[in-house]
Amino acid sequence: SQKIEQNSEALNIQEGKTATLTCNYTNYSPAYLQWYRQDPGRGPVFLLLIRENEKEKRKERLKVTFDTTLKQSLFHITASQPADSATYLCALAPGQNFVFGPGTRLSVLP
Amino acid sequence: DGGITQSPKYLFRKEGQNVTLSCEQNLNHDAMYWYRQDPGQGLRLIYYSQIVNDFQKGDIAEGYSVSREKKESFPLTVTSAQKNPTAFYLCASTSKQGHYGYTFGSGTRLTVV
């Protein structure tokens, strides 16, 4: 069956460290993969999109990798800050619409 | 400012009642979507529309209905046939061209009382 998994429901890291979140998928062949940030009680906010022919994408302190062989995307936040605390969702597009993972709740501790 | 407006923010439904959630966008986006979010689960697609007067069922359309009479508006009706409607409902839109990010509204939390 098709599945999207994101590493552990919650991740705690110390301020200033690099946070690494994982998105693994099974039985999909996505052409695109996106990452979103969601704060409690709010809608997700789009962060980055990476295409299947791109290995890596960067935006300020954010970096996303996409390995279609491993069927995995990694999302990195460098020099993390307490303001980065939120739930991060990956979403992939095997076809016309995006399918979302369950999310990882990141807490950056001061 | 362009964006998506969902209303109301909180909605309470009695058993056997139909309720309608509003979604309006001023981004000139062609495609609009309704998702349902439950704790610990990913967003699940209810309905989507790529063009005015046309819409398709998503993965969990049973008990829901939509209309797309105007490009800007995509209301969702939760009917009495939806047996477990308590959830957080999110509306989103995107340009039809290319796979750009979705713009989401701030959501409606529906509770059955």
Image (spheres, coloured by chain):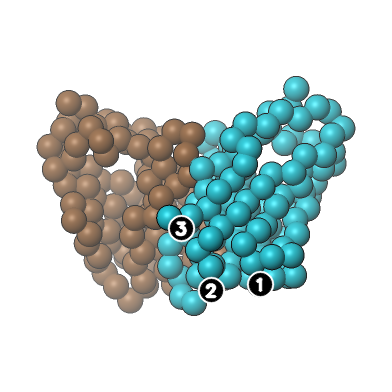
Chain colours: A brown, B cyan
Give the left or right position of residue A95, taking residue A56 as reference: right
Q: Which amino acid does label 3 sit on?
A: Gly
**Residue at image x 74%, y 70%?**
B53
Task: Determine the residue located farthest toward the right in the rendered image.
Answer: B16
Lower sequence index among marks 1 and 3 = 3
Q: Is residue B35 above or below residue A8?
A: below
Provide the chain ID for the residue under circle 3. Answer: B
Q: In which quarter of the image is the C terminus of chain A?
A: top left
Q: Residue B51 carries which label?
A: 1
Instruction: Name the residue beneath numbered marker 3.
Output: B2
Q: What element carries label 3?
A: loop
Give the left or right position of residue A12, taking residue A30 as reference: left
Whether residue B60 appears in this view of the structure is no
Q: Do the residues labelled 2 and 1 touch (CB within 8 Å)?
A: yes
**Dividing the picture into quarters, in which one does residue A56 lie?**
bottom left
Front residue of this view, candidates B49 and B22: B22
Lower sequence index among marks 2 and 1 = 1
Tags 2 and 1 both on a single chain: yes
Q: Which amino acid does label 2 sit on?
A: Lys
**Residue at image x 26%, y 69%?**
A55
Number of numbered discs visible in the structure rendering: 3
Q: Residue B96 carries which label?
A: 2
Mark 2: few/some/many CA within 10 Å (<14, 14-19, 20+): some
Q: In this view, does B75 lie above or below B98?
A: above
**Residue at image x 51%, y 43%?**
B106
